[in-house]
Amino acid sequence: MSERKYGIKHLAGAFLCGSLFFSGIAMASSEQIEVSFQKLAFYVQGEDKSSADGIFNNNGKEVPESLIYQGTTYVPIRMVSGLLGQPVYWENNGKAVSIEVPTVVLVDQDGQVIGSAVLKQVEDDVEISIKVSDLTPGKHGFHIHQNAFTGTEFAAAGGHFNPDGKQHGHLNPDGHHLGDLPNLEVNEDGTAEATFLVEHATLEPGKPNSLLGRSLIIHAGEDDQMTDPSGDSGDRVAGGNIPN
């Protein structure tokens, strides 16, 4: 039997799976736990990556780099990703972690997971690959919306992502929104699989055309690609937040 070799990405995945989400420990109010926050040294491929104070800036919040609980060491996922050079994305609504590329968990109006979408930077554009099920057959409006939402409150996603102040629709002479996408075509069995390219968008944090922290929304009806503000595509029947 040949020996299988594992690279840094395999190590990242294994390490992240054993890490504690954002140094948090879930516990019942009646329990008492004891943890140690002693400073540890971190080495990646022999290089010392240790900090001076043992504190990690976790998206603006200072947390311990590590803690020891019942003999096991826990490290924030974002810190591990930084050490190993693998981007990590966290989406709070779906309690989902994405490694290397942001992945959107899509839910219906009942909160049931019906699929996912993966976002990738392709030069100056962003590619969105979506795979869903349990939708009504036919064409559905599919857009990037301005805000993330909580639960299944799709209305809280706001309007289409439109940093350039344009009108709606790829057929509109005054359009289109950056968040306007072609219709999602659903098969007779309720499934759909498609890839779309969002031109001049980015996954770089803090940029005005960044898609991070926004949402994907699927509508009940077809988008006519002309009528402002949403193509007369009807109710919002499914969606998911783009992690950041």
Image (cartoon, rainbow, N blue to C red):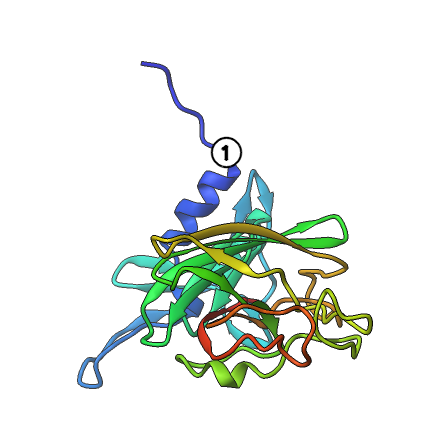
Give left or right: position of 175 versus 153. right
Disc 1 target residue? 7
| Percent of width and height locating residue 111 | 33, 74
Q: Quarter-wise, where is residue 177 in the image? A: bottom right
| Percent of width and height locating residue 56 | 55, 68
| Percent of width and height locating residue 122 | 70, 48
**Residue most toward the left?**
30
Instruction: Name the image quarter holding the N terminus.
Output: top left
Query: Quick one: label 1, few (<14), some, or many (20+) residues within 10 Å?
Result: few
Identity of the residue drawn at 55% across and 74% down: 233
Identity of the residue drawn at 55% across and 44% down: 44
- Is 17 or 100 nearer to us in this picture? 100
Going by the numbered disc 1, the residue's amino acid type is Gly
Q: Secondary structure at mark 1?
A: loop
Instruction: Name the image quarter holding the C terminus.
Output: bottom right
- Is 125 or 36 nearer to us in this picture? 125
